[in-house]
Image (spheres, grey):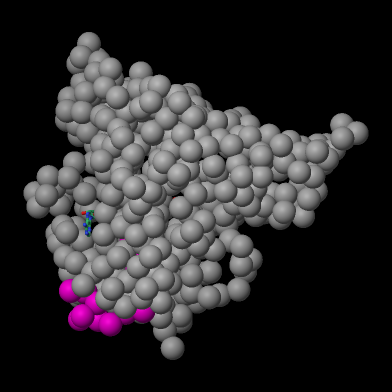
């Protein structure tokens, strides 16, 4: 029997990853997914976008609803997938659980620890399942690293140096839409950093207990001398600006999904990055103490000439280096032994045009119960909560001038936005 799905939030992620993925679109999913999954309805507060999304999925008659409760009472699905802005995850997830649905929430789980706790409590009470879309767990390098650390290959991990460095077009994209409003994303340490913070906690298999952090917004600030327009579509700098958002890339799907539905809710996706409307930082540096004593540093940078990322784990028996190269973008994993020899570990990476090195397809396959993944790769909500907790502690620390913040200080309210300069 097929599992019935409702996809909630018909933007890029809802349509481009999950709806088309479940339907087995080339480059998005596998043809056999159609034998296991049925897309029963779409939900979006913007019905124009919802209808466009149905057409993009080649299912123009797919029912579209404004709320998950309405959708569920009409189609009686088994699972829903939540791909709406981060600040809506808690409310939609709890409504979906109450309506009898199992829930996949795309990362991050929520925008505060207390919202995570509310989702987990509702899950426990309703007896439904919740999974979190931490797709980077499905990359070959990350799962091999998690197994090696758990198997004690480098002994007890004492120190981790980690960073996520984004090039201008990618890093800047978070300053064009809702992400740069702290009340919607809880900042980039939550929205974007949660991928890597989840990997860190998952690979270490440990619980963060204390965080100290600094952060600033210094790059995405008003630059009136540039003489830019309010949005890329109208801007004279489109041929030279590294932040240019091309509405017509990928066969114009962004124009159809976003531009053509602006009239309904005024949601503009190509606003100029150089603005005073932002309430988040564009670079942050934090230190984490874990329950078993490991110390970790993590930097998030949104304005680098090239993207790369790394996690360097040093243990009592060696060092494990995991990352994506800034030179060619390729993933690497290498073991540095105490005798100074280096072993490069083979990675099954770069397998064509599936999202995130095939991780999105593996995530969907795992959700459908198909083989190919390890049980540890499924992100349970109590695990995904750890990444939100680090971001939550980090925001509290930044607001308190870098004071170390303990886990117990979270869970009662929302973390504060960065102080205004
Ligand atoms: N796992 C990943 O690699 C990854 C990558 C990108 C985004 N994401 C996550 O996916 C989610 C969606 O991101 P996106 O870029 O597709 O966003 P988006 O803004 O493009 O789309 C969000 C959609 O949700 C709709 N919406 C807003 N509030 C709603 C509500 N209350 N009920 C129903 N619909 C509502 C909007 O109208 C819009 O169509 C975010 O949580 C983001 O963090 C995950």
Q: Is residue 245 visible?
A: no
Instruction: Give the residue drawn at x 41%, y 41%.
Output: 409
Outermost residue toward the left in this view: 263
Q: Is residue 93 visible?
A: yes
Place of residue 144 in the rendered image (x, y in percent of width and height, measured from the top left): 70, 53
- From the viewer's perspective, tell me whether residue 113 is left or right of residue 314: left
- From the viewer's perspective, tell me whether residue 225 is left or right of residue 308: left
Q: Does the magenta-highlighted stretch encompass residue 222? A: no
Instruction: Give the residue drawn at x 25%, y 41%.
Output: 183
Place of residue 37 in the rendered image (x, y in percent of width and height, measured from the top left): 41, 78
Q: Which residues are magenta?
A: 70-82
Instruction: Give the residue drawn at x 55%, y 75%.
Output: 370
Residue 146 versus residue 360: which sits nearer the camera? 146
* Quarter the N terminus occupies: bottom left
Q: Quadrant of residue 71?
A: bottom left
Place of residue 281 in the rendered image (x, y in percent of width and height, measured from the top left): 36, 28
Q: Quadrant of residue 178?
A: top left
Q: Is 2 situated above or below 125?
A: below
Instruction: Give the residue drawn at x 26%, y 22%.
Output: 420
Q: Does the magenta-highlighted stretch encompass residue 77? A: yes
């Amino acid at each position: 029997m097929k599992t019935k799905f409702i996809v909630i939030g018909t933007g890029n992620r809802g349509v481009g990853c999950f709806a088309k993925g479940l339907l087995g679109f080339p480059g998005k999913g596998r043809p056999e997914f159609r034998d296991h999954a049925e897309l029963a309805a779409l939900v979006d507060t913007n019905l124009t976008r919802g209808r466009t999304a149905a057409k993009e999925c080649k299912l123009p008659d797919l029912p579209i609803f404004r709320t998950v409760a309405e959708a569920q009472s009409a189609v009686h699905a088994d699972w829903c997938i939540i791909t709406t802005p981060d600040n809506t995850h808690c409310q939609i997830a709890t409504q979906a659980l109450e309506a009898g649905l199992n829930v996949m929430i795309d990362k991050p789980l929520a925008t505060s620890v207390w919202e995570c706790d509310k989702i987990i409590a509702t899950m426990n009470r309703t007896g439904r399942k919740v999974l979190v879309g931490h797709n980077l767990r499905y990359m070959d390098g990350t799962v091999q690293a998690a197994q090696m650390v758990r198997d004690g290959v480098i002994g007890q991990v004492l120190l981790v140096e980690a960073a996520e460095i984004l090039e201008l077009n990618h890093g800047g994209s978070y300053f064009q839409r809702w992400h740069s409003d702290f009340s919607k994303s809880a900042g980039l340490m939550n929205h974007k950093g949660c991928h890597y913070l989840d990997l860190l906690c998952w690979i270490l298999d440990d619980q963060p207990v204390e965080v100290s952090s600094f952060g600033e917004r210094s790059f995405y600030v008003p630059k009136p001398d540039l003489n830019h327009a309010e949005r890329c579509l109208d801007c004279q700098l489109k041929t030279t600006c590294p932040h240019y958002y091309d509405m017509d890339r990928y066969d114009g799907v962004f124009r159809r999904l976003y531009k053509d539905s602006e009239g309904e809710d005024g949601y503009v996706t190509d606003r100029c990055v150089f603005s005073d409307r932002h309430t988040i930082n564009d670079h942050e540096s934090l230190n984490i103490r874990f329950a078993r004593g490991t110390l970790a540093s993590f930097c998030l940078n949104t304005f680098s000439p090239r993207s790369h990322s790394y996690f360097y784990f040093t243990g009592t028996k060696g060092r494990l280096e995991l990352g994506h190269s800034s030179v060619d973008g390729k993933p690497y994993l290498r073991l540095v032994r105490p005798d100074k020899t280096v072993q490069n570990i083979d990675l099954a990476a770069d397998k064509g045009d599936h999202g995130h090195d095939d991780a999105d397809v593996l995530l969907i396959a795992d959700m459908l119960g198909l083989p190919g993944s390890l049980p540890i790769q499924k992100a349970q909500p109590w695990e995904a909560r750890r990444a939100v907790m680090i971001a939550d502690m980090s925001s509290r620390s930044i607001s308190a001038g870098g004071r170390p913040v303990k886990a117990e200080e979270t869970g009662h309210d929302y973390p504060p936005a960065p102080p205004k300069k």
